[in-house]
């Protein structure tokens, strides 16, 4: 588990911000390189489109998080803008990121191949998911539901860890499982790219795989989340993103 701050030379970073920032830089680099390998120029335009998507995605991701947890934020309104302390909803961040990038593409950077850009984001989805769960293991968010005994479940699924209140207990190992699933999804997408599989469908496939994993992981989580018809709100959103990814892949089936 990482400390909550990381020092590099004379600079000190919040670990949550540092990990997500590192993931974002790598993802933008992948998108720019992908475009460069397919076209003679346009890397600067791709970076501009990615940055537009990033800005809108962060804003919508925060809005989604605040709306879901409005019972808390209505009494702590001063914390709404404290993004560096953690708290982004990945579903609304993805939707906002795609929308922001699309607006930048059609309005200013018209030379960017938007479909190729989304395909390069197939790796970004699990990569940022990995960084998010890694950050959660440090800030104790997304912790697992408490169990009676570690021996009641396979060793891969459980560990002894603290909740957000610092109370250590046997619980489901949601943060490591989230990181493991991110590595698996990245591996699948990288193999698809290497073998030439799922052309024009990789973004949708990545979104489907990630959403499916998060939907199942939701059954093991113990952090507070509003419930609707027996499911956590984020599980309903996972299902929505699963459908969205499937629709994207179906749309490009030809």
Image (cartoon, rainbow, N blue to C red):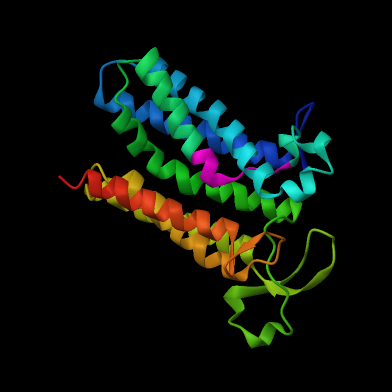
- Name the image quarter holding residue 155: bottom right
Magenta residues (range) = 86-94
Please give the count of numbered marks on the rendered protein. Answer: 0
Which residue occupies 76% across, 50% down?
A: 71
In the picture as drawn, the residue positioned furthest to the left comes out as 254
Above or below residue 29? Residue 218 is below
Expressed as whole percent of the image width and height from the top left, the position of residue 165 reads 84, 60
- Residue sitting at x 74%, y 84%: 148
Foreground of the two, 76 or 49? 76
Image quarter hosting the N terminus: bottom right
42 vs 224, left or right, is: left
Q: Looking at the image, can residue 4 be seen?
A: no
| Percent x, y of residue 111 | 30, 16
Q: In this view, does 233 lie to the left or right of 165?
A: left
The image quadrant that residue 153 belongs to is bottom right
Query: Please, which residue is most extreme toward the front here?
Result: 229
Residue 70 appearing in the image = yes
Residue at left offset 65%, top offset 87%: 152
- Which residue is painted at 61% across and 48% down in the image? 132
In magenta stretch: residue 83: no
In the displayed structure, would residue 95 be above or below residue 232?
Answer: above
Front residue of this view, candidates 134 and 79: 79
Image position, residue 17 (x, y; %): 68, 37
Q: Which quadrant, please, contains the C terminus?
A: top left
């Amino acid at each position: 588990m990482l400390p909550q701050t990381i020092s590099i030379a004379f600079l000190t970073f919040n670990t949550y911000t540092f990990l997500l920032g590192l993931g974002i830089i790598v993802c933008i680099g992948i998108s720019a390189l992908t475009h460069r390998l397919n076209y003679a120029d346009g890397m600067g335009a791709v970076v501009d489109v990615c940055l537009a998507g990033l800005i809108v995605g962060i804003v919508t991701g925060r809005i989604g998080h605040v709306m879901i947890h409005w019972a808390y934020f209505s009494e702590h309104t001063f914390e709404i803008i404290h993004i560096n302390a953690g708290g982004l909803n990945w579903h609304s961040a993805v939707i906002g990121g795609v929308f922001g990038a699309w607006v930048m593409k059609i309005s200013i950077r018209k030379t960017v191949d938007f479909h190729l850009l989304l395909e390069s984001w197939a790796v970004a989805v699990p990569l940022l998911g990995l960084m998010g769960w890694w950050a959660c293991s440090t800030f104790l968010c997304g912790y697992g539901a408490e169990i009676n005994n570690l021996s009641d479940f396979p060793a891969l699924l459980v560990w002894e860890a603290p909740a957000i209140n610092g109370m250590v207990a046997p619980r489901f190992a949601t943060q490591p499982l989230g990181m493991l699933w991110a590595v698996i999804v990245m591996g699948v997408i990288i193999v698809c790219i290497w073998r030439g599989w799922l052309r024009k469908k990789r973004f949708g496939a990545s979104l489907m795989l990630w959403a499916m994993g998060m939907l199942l992981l939701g059954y093991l989580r113990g952090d507070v989340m509003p419930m609707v018809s027996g499911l956590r709100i984020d599980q309903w959103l996972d299902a929505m993103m699963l459908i969205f990814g499937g629709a994207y892949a179906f749309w490009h089936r030809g």
